[in-house]
Amino acid sequence: IIEAVGIWEDVISAFLYKVLLQNESFNLLDVGAFNGHYSIQVAAAGRKSVAVEAKQKHISMIIKAIQLNHFADRITVLHNAIDKVARKAIGITRDNNRGGTQVRLQNSKHNNSVLTITLNDLLDVSDFNTAVLMIDIEGHESNAFASADKLFDKMYIPIVFMEWAICRLGKNCEIDDLEFIQDFLYQRGYSPHKYIHNRYFLTQSTLLNREEYMEWPYDIYWVHPKAKLRL
């Protein structure tokens, strides 16, 4: 992707940058941070980020990027996976997607474990009260939202970026998981949207129909009713 386009997840990156320009108070919760691209992007705009990543190899990449850009005062890095409770797990990366780390409960065959934390735990390490949530944890989103009530009650989260099709296609989660995620966000007034873009950049967005959630696209974002966004 980077070789072809010149930027990681170009449409989402462009949208995030536009959102940051419009809202000086927005910071980032970067859950499933991979190489830290979004955290670095946010830090370059003068904001702060908490980057959560399960794979040690990816953590090393993030720390290297922080050092090269002198962003240690803007990015907090957590070597953890996100779950509904704290426990030991392992991160498994798919061969065809180095950025896609799936979490499995630890068993006796694996020593390379990582401790899981909850989204609520991010309140303890965040020194801001407004943040965009970027969550990309390969179908474990319902487990994450199962322990996110305090986070959403105490922090203003204007936008939630997430992959939808991983669950919709039955990868790592079930229909009940999709419905739980919807209920969690709809009950808090969020509305789901899809991106409409030309080759690289977002041109507009469209509100998604709840009844058609099994047809929603791969990447979606949820908007808080108080958020003011201009495309």
Image (spheres, rainbow, N blue to C red):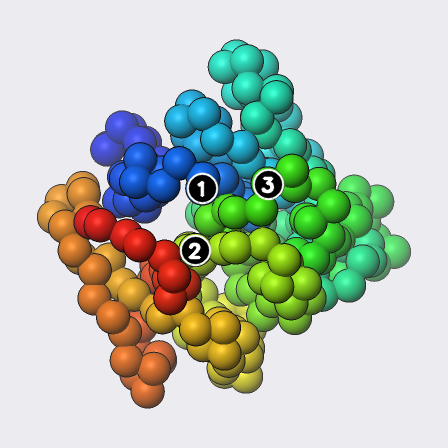
Marks 3/1: CA–CA distance: 9 Å
The answer to whether residue 148 is above or below residue 63 is below
Q: Give SS at disc 1.
A: loop
- How packed mark 3 is, by other alpha carbons closer than 10 Å (few <14, some 14-19, many 20 or more), is some
| Residue type highlighted by circle 3 | Phe
Number of marks present in the image shown: 3
Res 226 quadrant in image: bottom left
Residue at image coords 65%, 38%:
127
Q: Where residue 158 sits in the image (x, y, percent)? A: 43, 55
Residue denoted by label 3: 128
Residue that label 2 marks: 158
Q: CA distance from mark 2 to mark 1?
A: 8 Å
Q: Quadrant of residue 146?
A: bottom right
Is 6 placed above or below 93 here?
above
Element type where label 2 sits in the image:
loop
Residue shown at the point (27%, 28%) measured from the top left: 6
In this view, the residue farthest toward the right is: 108
Q: Tell me which numbered mark, 3 or 1, is placed earlier along the sequence.
A: 1
Q: To which residue does mark 1 refer?
A: 26
Q: Describe residue 146's horizontal placement relative to residue 31 as left or right.
A: right
* Residue type beneath disc 1: Phe
Residue 67 at x, y = what percent?
Answer: 58, 14
Q: CA separation, marks 3 and 2? A: 13 Å
